[in-house]
Amino acid sequence: ILNVEQSPQSLHVQEGDSTNFTCSFPSSNFYALHWYRWETAKSPEALFVMTLNGDEKKKGRISATLNTKEGYSYLYIKGSQPEDSATYLCAFTRTSGSRLTFGEGTQLTVNP
Amino acid sequence: DVKVTQSSRYLVKRTGEKVFLECVQDMDHENMFWYRQDPGLGLRLIYFSYDVKMKEKGDIPEGYSVSREKKERFSLILESASTNQTSMYLCASSLQSDIQYFGAGTRLSVL
């Protein structure tokens, strides 16, 4: 079983704060790193898929970076809003079409 | 939009019952997956399938089986439900690009 670790486990921030969290994964035989957002009572939704070392992706106030050589990815949220409250999951895959291995997630709560 | 539909949002079953969790996707995806989610453990893969009538064990297949008779439908079967199978179950599907599209989840309680 591949080990994907996320930190912190949970995070409470105030509205307007910027925040970031980490995903670490095995760097050997890397294929892709995914980020998903899972809001309460909804389905997990894909945010980003990154494959190349140095990749940076952005969607609105959320961005992510990837370092495949050292095996980590950061997710950043600029100016957090209460609607950003969710569990953020990262997942790793070694070959195209193969299974994803998920981390435990970071639970973000943004207080108004 | 891709739609992945799980047949029930909440289920309550008794120990020893046979339980079927159904999942249907409408985008002709080859790959389908069943996960369970427990506090502090994240999403753990139970079984997956790359094609009709094909199945592969995930990380925690014990106590479960699956069926994929049609491309759009992937069923998870608990042959004899036990209390340690109380959990949130999520189905997902994908094309070769690997982005997985998830259903809303089934919260199963085994009493």
Image (cartoon, rainbow, N blue to C red):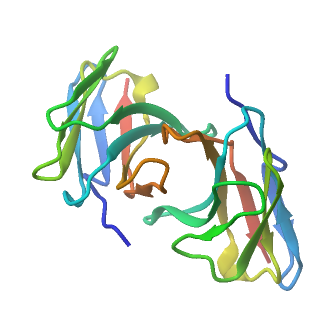
Number of marks in the image? 0
Residue A41 vertical placement versus B13 (above, below): above
Image side of residue A18 versus residue B4, left or right:
left
Front-lying residue, A34 or B80: A34
The residue at 37%/57% (across/down) is A103
Residue A8 vertical placement versus B12 (above, below): above
From this viewpoint, which residue is outermost toward the top? A60
From this viewpoint, which residue is outermost toward the left? A70
Residue B35 appears at what percent x and percent y? 60, 60
Residue A96 vertical placement versus B18 (above, below): above
The residue at 19%/57% (across/down) is A27
The residue at 33%/44% (across/down) is A32
| Image quadrant occupied by the C terminus of chain A | top left
Residue B96 appears at what percent x and percent y? 53, 41
Residue A25 appears at what percent x and percent y? 25, 57
Residue B27 appears at what percent x and percent y? 72, 32
The residue at 64%/44% (across/down) is B93
Quarter holding residue B48: bottom right
| Image quadrant occupied by the N terminus of chain A | bottom left
Front-lying residue, B54 or A32: B54
Front-lying residue, A5 or B29: B29
Image side of residue A59 versus residue B12, left or right:
left
Quarter holding residue B102: top right
Image side of residue B21 versus residue A18, left or right:
right
Residue A46 vertical placement versus A27 (above, below): above
